[in-house]
Image (spheres, rainbow, N blue to C red):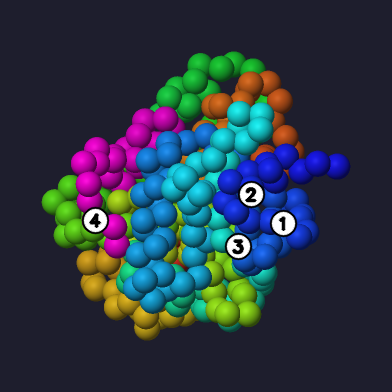
Amino acid sequence: MYDRGLGVLEQYGIEAKTTVRGRGALICETDSGLKIIREYWGSPGKMERQRQLQLHCREAGFPLVDLVLENQEGQVVTTGEEGIPYIVRDWYQGRECDTRSREDIKKSVRAMADLHTVMVLEREDETAPPGLTDECRRHNRELRRIQKFLQRKKKKNEFEETLSGSIQGFLEQGEQTADEMESLFSTESEREQEDRVCHGECTQHNVLFTGKGIAFTNFEHWNRSPQICDLGQFMRKILEKYQWNLRLGDEMIKAYDSGKCLSEKELLKLKLYLAYPWKFWKLANFYTNSNKVWISQKNLEKLEQTIALAKPWNEFLEHFPGE
């Protein structure tokens, strides 16, 4: 069967030897190493900036990034036979970070610190995106709207009853956290980072253990948020799996700090990032964007797990490592 998108390799002067389907992508073994082909419907300009960032990472000493390639005409987005736009990137043979392995987790965080030290991209005429405080306040407004909707609704299913009964506590925590973020994540404070950027999607799925070292992939969400947000996102997703284990949290912070020293202010920013109820908001937002008629049992279980984790989560914050 013909693999859609494979034909664009001709525009790069690359020939595929073997192919295998990945997550919404085509991974190819070529005469110039592994490549990955993926549809891309975003801005070519944003992708060109991503390539600049990745080139800088390589030149500054962090070579294992999935560099976006230019075709023979010097373009980063290539149109295929059916008019579909694609990007081609370098890829790596390896495995994702194993969240069951504490060693994998600590090594991933240490590598993230190394990546952050070189993740610099000079500012151009960019529109400043909303800051983290603005994002949290927007999520709080969304939670309030959901709360009011559920209060008016007379007949609720099990998911709605559970959501309605728990939303006030999470909303209060979200509002308190946003208030505390106001000064630390202000525009003036964020300017201190100068040209530093963060990956934007630092999860275990985008950390590959290869024979050459640890690689970071899928930079499409890079942004100007404080780099501590990458660490916070990675830690949150891991610690939710470990019941917010204080010792593991401490080990992760120390692993990062051994590569990129964390100031007291950055530790406080990290704590505030972790104090926001991201998982609860995500589940509530999914409910809003669904048809509100049928919610899967899996999402109900996720909501119940998030509520059950509230106690260890708050205990973790109360005894936050580094304080």
Q: Which residues, given as a range, are shown in magenta? A: 120-143
Q: Is residue 265 left or right of residue 116?
A: left
Residue carrying label 2: 9
- In which quarter of the view is residue 300 placed? top right
Number of residues whose C-alpha sits closer than 10 Å to that of mark 1, classed few (under 14), some (14–19) or many (20 or more) = some
Distance (Cα) linking label 2 and label 1: 8 Å
| Callout 1 amino acid | Ala
Between label 4 and label 1, give the one nearer the viewer. 1
- In which quarter of the view is residue 241 placed? bottom right
Cβ atoms at labels 2 and 1 below 8 Å apart? yes
Residue carrying label 3: 91
Name the N-terminal-most of marks 3 and 2.
2
Number of residues whose C-alpha sits closer than 10 Å to that of mark 2, classed few (under 14), some (14–19) or many (20 or more) = many
Residue carrying label 4: 122
Distance (Cα) linking label 3 and label 2: 14 Å
Number of residues whose C-alpha sits closer than 10 Å to that of mark 4, classed few (under 14), some (14–19) or many (20 or more) = few
Badge 4 marks a residue whose secondary structure is loop
In the image, residue 236 sits, relative to residue 281, either above or below, namely below
Q: Residue at x 44, y 48 (%)?
A: 74
Residue carrying label 1: 16
Between label 1 and label 3, give the one nearer the viewer. 1
Name the N-terminal-most of marks 2 and 4.
2
Near-viewer residue (70 or 202): 70
